[in-house]
Image: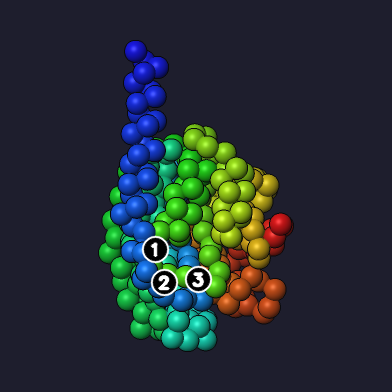
Amino acid sequence: MAGLRAALSRSFTALSAGAALWLAAPLPGIAADPVRLELVLAVDCSSSVNQQEFILQMEGIAAAFEDPAVLAALEQAGSQGIAVSLLQWSSASAQTQAIAWTHVVGPGGALAFADKVRRVGRRVPGGATALGNAIDAAVLWTQSNAFQGERVVVDVSGDGRSNEGGSPAFARAAANRAGVTINGLAILNEEPRLARYYLAGVVGGPGAFLLTADDFDDFAVAMRRKLYFEIVGPPIAEAPPATAPGTQATLANGG
């Protein structure tokens, strides 16, 4: 009986995911809006992230969209702009699109999105760390929106290794086959070697890169640099200097 319940649960989960994709997909015959970048900001809300650390993440993302260098990069993106959504995630069954796909054009659009980020609450109260499932959910949302990006990026931030759900490396491989790049922001306060783990099994795809922050207080600095790189392209050109010694960028294998 337990096996039957598990099988039914898996079937229900698969059907629910399929229904969500069908409901979110653009209607046939309606052209997607071209944008320079489709970006999912996938934010760790597992139990290792307390409420104060969650607030620091949200404030860091909001501040990044207000940064002068980021605003200048968005101006260069022109009228196409970028499309952004915010995913909160923790365990294998906990991924929530906290902010729906938003078309951000120019400084005005960026400031409005920053306001949305500051007002969004924590939709995922805690749980395990299922990086692979978070990547899968983020990629699904990139395939079911009303935008067509020149580049498609999932920006995963977190402070720990995956301890539940599917393999992040398998999810990364599937994302890369679909043309989605996975960038990372590893927060090192609990796991000093997390950057190595992210490079080996999370980050990948064309132009992929990893940024690190020593702790959640450094998150805002890393996020500003990361968002700039994601709008203008991977960090092979000059970028705004880091203002915290614990923040650094590492290029991943673009394979």
Task: Tell me where residue 34 appears, x and y as whole percent.
Answer: 46, 76
Secondary structure found at label 3: strand
Disc 1 and disc 3 in contact, CB within 8 angstroms = no
CA gap, disc 1 and disc 3: 10 Å
In terms of sequence position, does the residue under pointer 2 or pointer 1 come before the other? 2
Asked if one can make out residue 199 in the rendered structure from this viewpoint, the answer is: yes
Instruction: Look at the numbered disc 1 and give the secondary structure of its residue.
Output: loop
Q: Position of residue 157 (x, y in %)?
A: 51, 54
Q: Quadrant of residue 241?
A: bottom right
Viewer can see residue 126? no
Amino acid residing under circle 1? Asn
Check the picture and name the quadrant holding the N terminus. Answer: top left
Is residue 232 left or right of 91 when viewed as pictured? right
Which residue does the numbered mark 1 point to in the structure image? Answer: 145
Q: Are marks 2 and 1 in contact (CB under 8 Å)?
A: yes
Name the quarter where the C terminus is drawn: bottom right
Please tell me how crowded label 1 is: few (under 14), some (14-19), or many (20+) other residues with Cα within 10 Å. some
User: Closest to the observer: 216 or 104?
Assistant: 104
Residue 142 appears in which quarter of the rendering? bottom left
- Indicate the position of residue 16 as horizontal and vertical percent values: 33, 41
Crowd band around label 2 with a 10 angstrom C-alpha radius: few (<14), some (14–19), many (20+): few
Q: Which mark is residue 149?
A: 3
Q: Which mark is residue 32?
A: 2
- Residue displayed at 33% across by 64% down: 27
Identity, as a three-letter code, of the amino acid under mark 2: Ala
- Foreground: disc 3 or disc 2: 2
- If you read the primary sequence from the N terminus, does the residue marked by circle 3 or circle 2 appear first? 2
Q: How many other residues sit within 10 Å of disc 3, few (<14), some (14-19) or many (≥20)?
A: many
CA separation, marks 2 and 1? 8 Å
